[in-house]
Image: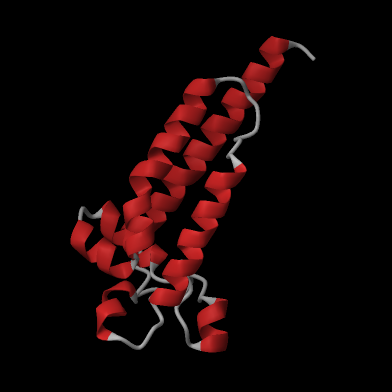
Amino acid sequence: MDHAKTNSDTAQRGWLLGAALLGALGVLYFFNPIEHAFYPACFFYKLTHLHCPSCGGLRAIHQLTHGNFTAAFHSNPLLTSSIPWLTWLGISKLRDRSGGALVIQPAVAWTLLAIVLLFGILRNLPFSAFAWMSS
């Protein structure tokens, strides 16, 4: 396969992903998830009445687009505190230019999974010490 074609395809995918991300952020900026019913409801919450690790994520991103960092953190502390790392990961992948798949070491993947699961468990415990984690 031609190397120039691979770089062109990668660049095109990058632009499409960037446009989709900007579009999604635009929707979240103008339409508050609390006030509009077209956003999907959390199936896990509907089924169990427990907060999943991503519950409050749309509200958090809406608040971030308006510069309300404290409100975003209260909506979903895990997502809000992971955005700098996710941004760094995205930028480093864009600078890579190899066009290959994003490779995450198994130890890192297992650690991230453990953090997400632990957050999901702790935010549902009925103790006041963990109440700040629930949305």
In this rendering, does residue 51 appear at all? yes
Write the residue at 53% across / 45% down.
108
List x then y, in percent, for residue 79: 38, 58
In the picture, measured across the screen, residue 26 lies left or right of residue 53, that is left
Quarter of image, res 86: top left
List x then y, in percent, for residue 30: 32, 59
List x then y, in percent, for residue 110: 57, 53
List x then y, in percent, for residue 89: 45, 36
Q: How many marks?
A: 0
Display colour scheme: secondary structure
Quarter of image, res 14: top right
In the picture, measured across the screen, residue 104 lies left or right of residue 126, that is right
Q: Which of 132 and 71 is in front in this view?
A: 132
Quarter of image, res 106: top right
In this rendering, does residue 135 appear at all? no
In the picture, measured across the screen, residue 114 lies left or right of residue 70, that is right
Q: Which of 36 and 74 is in front in this view?
A: 74
Outermost front residue: 107
For residue 125, above or below residue 28: below
Write the residue at 37% across / 60% down.
78
Q: Nearer the viewer, residue 124 or 106?
A: 106
Write the residue at 57% across / 86% down.
47
Write the residue at 48% across / 37% down.
18
Q: Which of 5 and 112 is in front in this view?
A: 112
Outermost right residue: 1
In the picture, the quarter occupied by the C terminus is bottom left
In the picture, the quarter occupied by the N terminus is top right
